[in-house]
Image: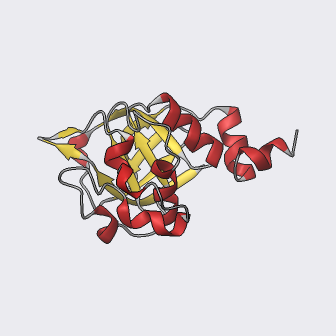
């Protein structure tokens, strides 16, 4: 699968931000919200330096960040807020285990970055991430590599979510 869009590079002091937990992605004060369409406006509302993300994000954007993205609680809101904004995927160096499972079960694309040349990319650039080839390209030039998606992850994404996938078994 190919994901092409404008990127948000979540950095601090020139490095990808690690350990962005679910409370930073979607603060617990908004957990009473149950309509996915309402969740997007609060994305990163509790992440210093990115509190205006939801106002500036556009459908088709891609988020790139560091290690352990989505650690913390099991709140589904932290996945669904990106769905509400029509973010096409989140790429991180690694994901919290529960976040990873929630995203996969929801059919939301998460990609694991093996390497990325931060000197060749900035927020606002357009990149192409090819999950089959394991590549990240900007203007046709290779700037990073991805881990391949698992067969189950691809199957669930193609079905729409884990419930739709289960109907195919």
Q: Quadrant of residue 14?
A: top left
| Residue 120 position in % (x across, y down) | 24, 47
In the rendered view, does 14 fall on the left or right side of 157?
left
| Residue 79 position in % (x across, y down) | 50, 50
In the rendered view, does 70 fall on the left or right side of 133?
left
Q: Is residue 26 visible?
A: no
Which residue does the image show at 31% across and 46% down from the upper left? 24
Task: Tell me how the rendering is colored.
Answer: secondary structure
Farthest left residue in view: 13
Which residue does the image show at 54% across and 63% down from the upper left? 36
| Residue 65 position in % (x across, y down) | 32, 42
Between residues 97 and 123, which one lies in front from this camera angle? 97
Q: Is residue 161 visible?
A: yes
In this view, 138 is above or below 151: below
In this view, 126 is above or below 164: below
In this view, 71 is above or below 160: above
Which residue does the image show at 63% across and 48% down from the upper left? 106
In the rendered view, does 3 fall on the left or right side of 153?
left
Between residues 141 and 12, which one lies in front from this camera angle? 12
Which residue does the image show at 25% across and 39% down from the upper left? 16
Q: If the image is split into quadrants, where does the C terminus sit?
A: top right
């Amino acid at each position: 699968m190919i994901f092409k869009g404008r990127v948000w590079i979540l950095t601090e002091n020139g490095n990808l931000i690690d350990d962005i937990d679910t409370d930073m992605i979607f603060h617990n004060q908004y957990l009473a919200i149950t309509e996915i369409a309402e969740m997007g406006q609060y994305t990163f509302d509790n992440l210093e330096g990115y509190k205006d993300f939801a106002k500036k994000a556009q459908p088709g954007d891609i988020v790139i960040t560091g290690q352990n993205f989505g650690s913390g609680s099991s709140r589904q809101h932290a996945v669904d807020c990106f769905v509400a904004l029509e973010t096409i995927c989140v790429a991180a160096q690694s994901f919290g285990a529960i976040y990873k499972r929630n995203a996969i079960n929801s059919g939301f694309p998460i990609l694991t970055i093996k390497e990325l040349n931060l000197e060749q990319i900035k927020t606002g650039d357009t990149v192409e991430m090819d999950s089959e080839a394991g590549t990240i390209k900007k203007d046709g030039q290779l700037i990073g590599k991805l881990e391949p998606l698992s067969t189950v992850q691809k199957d669930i994404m193609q079905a729409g979510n884990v419930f739709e996938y289960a109907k195919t078994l």
